[in-house]
Image: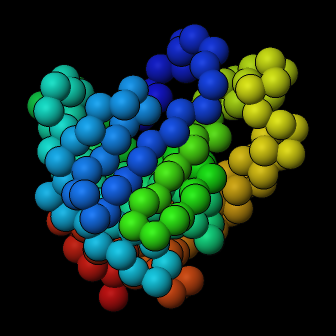
Amino acid sequence: MAQDSGMALHPPKRERFDVSAGVNVDPKGIARSVEEYRVEPFGLYMARPAPGRVQFHYLESWLLPELGLRVTDFWFTPGHEFDQDFYVDIVAIDVRDDVWVATDLYLDLAVRTGRSVTVLDTDELLEAATAGLITLEQARTALERAYRVVEALAAHDYDLPRWLAGLGMTTTWRRHPPTG
């Protein structure tokens, strides 16, 4: 989650989702226990507490390899809320057996259901590409994915679950009612 674009230049963050071990290994190498993993033909669902985080105490994510997206619902701690319903990371996803690896491609989107979407961290993407931390092809892919998501959300009244369901990717969330 990169609400503040004043982050220092860094290599792409990689996160591991080990389904059989029931852990999520964050980009810093910290393994966190996962309450629920669910593999669907279109992606991987994860729900887990977020110990040690001030801004949020729980998160749910869907990894969607076909779209190159990680969609997250952060359960914010009172006083740390952001004006968003879903946070979308543009990622590259590698799946090998029960281990999924997401490599962050810097761009993110904050989705406000029924209202709007905001693209975040374009500056980070451009700095990473200029510094050679990602290729120009990866940067172009990230931008094109972000454009597609923005266009699709606008066409679906900024209802991310409804858009995904229309693609045959019915996502379920603990805090959001099913799209129907």
Q: Quadrant of residue 177?
A: bottom left
**Residue 35 picture location, percent across and down:** 14, 58
Q: Quadrant of residue 129?
A: top right
| Residue at 39% over, 80% down | 40
The C terminus appears in which quarter of the rendering? bottom left
State whether residue 7 is above or below residue 3.
Answer: above
19 vs 53, nearest the viewer: 19
67 vs 117, nearest the viewer: 67
**Residue 169 picture location, percent across and down:** 47, 80
State whether residue 44 is above or below residue 150.
Answer: below
**Residue 120 picture location, percent across and down:** 58, 34
| Residue at 22% over, 57% down | 22
| Residue at 56% over, 83% down | 167
State whether residue 6 is above or below residue 87.
Answer: above
Whether residue 72 sits left or right of residue 108 in the image: it is left
Q: Is residue 157 visible?
A: no
The N terminus appears in which quarter of the rendering? top left
Q: Is residue 149 visible?
A: yes
Whether residue 77 sits left or right of residue 131 in the image: it is left
Whether residue 23 sits left or right of residue 139 in the image: it is left
160 vs 21, nearest the viewer: 21
**Residue 2 picture location, percent across and down:** 47, 29
| Residue at 54% over, 15% down | 7
